Image (cartoon, coloured by chain):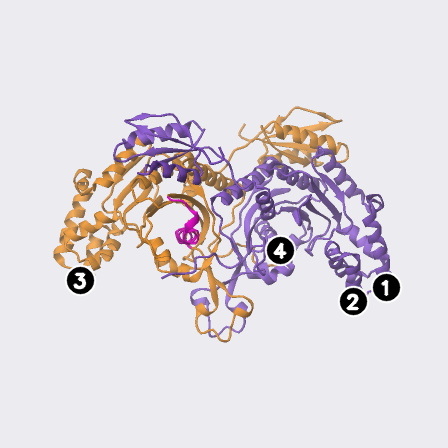
Chain colours: A orange, B purple
Amino acid sequence: MKVNTNPVRGMKDFLPDEAELREKVKRTIIDTYTTFGYRKIETPALEHLELLSGGDGGENEKLIFKILKRGEKLDLAGAKEENDLVDSGLKFDLTVSLSRIYANNQGNIPLPFKVIQADYVWRAERPQKGRYRQFMQCDIDIIGEKDIIAEIDLLLASSQALLNIGFKDFTIKINDRKVLHDLADKWGFEEKDHDSVFIALDKLDKIGVNGIQKELESKSFPPEAINAMLAELKIFNKGDEIADSFLSDELIKVIEAVTLSSNGQFKIEFDPTLVRGMGYYTGMIYEIKCDGYDGSVGGGGRYDKMIGKRIGQDVPACGISIGFERIVDIMLEQGQEKVKKEKLAIMFDPEKDDVKRVYAEAEMQRLSNKYIVSVVKKEKKFGKQLKKLLDQGFTHYTEIFDNKTTNTIPLKTNEE
Amino acid sequence: MKVNTNPVRGMKDFLPDEAELREKVKRTIIDTYTTFGYRKIETPALEHLELLSGGDGGENEKLIFKILKRGEKLDLAGAKEENDLVDSGLKFDLTVSLSRIYANNQGNIPLPFKVIQADYVWRAERPQKGRYRQFMQCDIDIIGEKDIIAEIDLLLASSQALLNIGFKDFTIKINDRKVLHDLADKWGFEEKDHDSVFIALDKLDKIGVNGIQKELESKSFPPEAINAMLAELKIFNKGDEIADSFLSDELIKVIEAVTLSSNGQFKIEFDPTLVRGMGYYTGMIYEIKCDGYDGSVGGGGRYDKMIGKRIGQDVPACGISIGFERIVDIMLEQGQEKVKKEKLAIMFDPEKDDVKRVYAEAEMQRLSNKYIVSVVKKEKKFGKQLKKLLDQGFTHYTEIFDNKTTNTIPLKTNEE
């Protein structure tokens, strides 16, 4: 039987070069966060559908991979709608699971709780270049801290993680949902229309001031409010000084603290047009852009009301997610795909060599910590085999003749 | 809305102590395998159902979590059977995905291909203590090596991984499907009955010689064959010397090579009653038992025919899986749950302290590599807060008075 050997539509296999790079990046992120006092937790891939469909996921709730009921619970004939057939789904982000695990362990978790999550999530999006239906998210969150100390900590930790990966010259854009509401009030939009205004504003990069004008006019918002907004957006575009007059004291403190700790390796700037999509944000929001690359490499915000929905009592919380897949893509574009290591082949001729001696040699070389060591069976056409070893990433080999080891010999690439 | 905040039935959340231990164990395993020249690959959680249901998964194929079709492809009214509704499933082991990724990249992968996989798999088993429906598997496999050099390598690498985790005094049991077939022939069973005989033999630990007798008699196999088998099983039970007369030359070579490299830290022994469940094994099979603990902490075997089913041409292959969940359970039983680290709280009073100085101090302490460093807002009741810091795993704190840092002060536990 010959079956389709491609991965499932919209998903991706990773061969060693890429898988090793991913492992390295993931470890660097987790290790950096650990030095800032964040601690790893893990939740299963599956979550109850009622939790996933609770309303905080926005558009993502339409993209859930749902799991068929099993055994007696599956009533194929009696099922009237999709949800009669399914009982769980793959998680589409890590925040929903975080709020669930916190709610489920409230009494046992001292606050503030500084959390790392580095896990896969799944979204049944239309497949497109560079976007996959299974992707890694690396989040940190602080639960139980209402002070801006939390935001400063999140931004410094995630910046340090990016620096440790090897990223520089990135810019943190920061805003506050409160600033956005104040602006919308000032422009003259009714509170019930704020979210529509923000959704339009969020597209500024893509559709420009004119596009926003069209979108807002199509919704029949008051022309004076639209005009006031457009006038201000044009001012924002001209220079930071004017935009800065909308800064809150809290934003100023966060920007100062992060700037002082940045040692000039990255920037943080106020962006009054930053919205970020998720409806659950209640305070500061932030996004990290990398000079010369589209899209963001990180983003997050404060969501003080989300956990309250689960446990009936508000708990302040905020988080930031590093765009793991985007980062790995950029590193690949930059040609950083190989995690370079010295790799030694211990050539072994089963006809001649003593197996004991071969493995003793391998162990000794491994203990020297200089090499990755692999015992390789010697083939008849040795020259051809040496070429194959190069293809397999070996950098050195050693032969065992009459139970005497020769020195390690570097393999020569064609470039040399 | 208050929803069920437990994880999905049969699955488990991991809070920091356990999540950090898991991360540490996983890294140790991957790093050890890397030094032996194995390389990590990754495949998605989802696989095509036709692949998962291809027959190599045995009983596991009945335990697949299936994914509902989406959008236009889901025809609820027209669906006649379960498989009309679903198009993929969560993988139940890593071997099926390995054979798929190899088949899909044949031309690009030089052989032998030494592979690490460390990923979650899912099985909808009846929930029971210590068994979860999502669990981690850590596998290594060698594709394209028919010589016993592959088996020796797998066994030495996985033993070293166990030693590096901190396990000692484990025993590798080894057998060969060929030995089993030779024995079944000798006893007088027909070849078509061999698998039934092996399934019974596999239960020797659980049901004993008498249980096997009952099971075989119930299947009406020839009484002489049953008697011959039972007589030999009683001999096996009495001592190694007699069992050893069934050893093949290849098994002897593997046992010798592994014993010589073990430095007395673990044992390898022939077990002619070892079967292992999976029908796809074609040659040597092995299992690792840990003295004093039930079940195995690892196992695997050679499966030279499986990849051929996908690509129409046999490729020799063998692998071993470390029982990650069992290992973590044993470590927890042994009280090894905490990954111990020095953790420093930089106390910060937003009313008095200069935020710049606080974060500069935090960065300096972090760079010293002595501590995990967390900036903590000082609370009014400082004595009470110090107790809370202990609960959160802090070992030291430092206060900033009038912009002068005190030394780091150890936090005292009640035991002291």
Pointer 4 and pointer 1: residues touching (CB < 8 Å)?
Answer: no
Which quadrant holds the N terminus of chain B? bottom left
Q: Is residue B194 visible?
A: yes
For marks 4 and 1, the one nearer the N-term is: 1
Q: Nearer the viewer, mark 4 or mark 2?
A: 2
Q: Within 10 Å of the Cα at label 4, are there few (<14), some (14-19), or many (20+) other Cα atoms?
A: many
Q: Which span of residues is magenta-colored?
A: A92-111
Residue A101 part of the magenta-drawn span: yes
> Where B105 falls versus A85 (above or below)?
above
Relative side of A140 to B62, left or right: left
Above or below B270: residue B348: above
**Towards the viewer: A296 or A335:** A296
**Type of amino acid at the residue the image marks with label 2:** Ser
Q: Is residue B381 magenta?
A: no
Task: Tell me if mark 3 has few (under 14), some (14-19) or many (20+) residues whose alpha carbon lies within 10 angstroms of its own.
Answer: few
How far, Cα to Cα, is label 4 from label 3?
60 Å
SS state under label 2: helix
Query: Number of callouts in the render?
Result: 4
Q: Which residue is mark 4?
A: B310
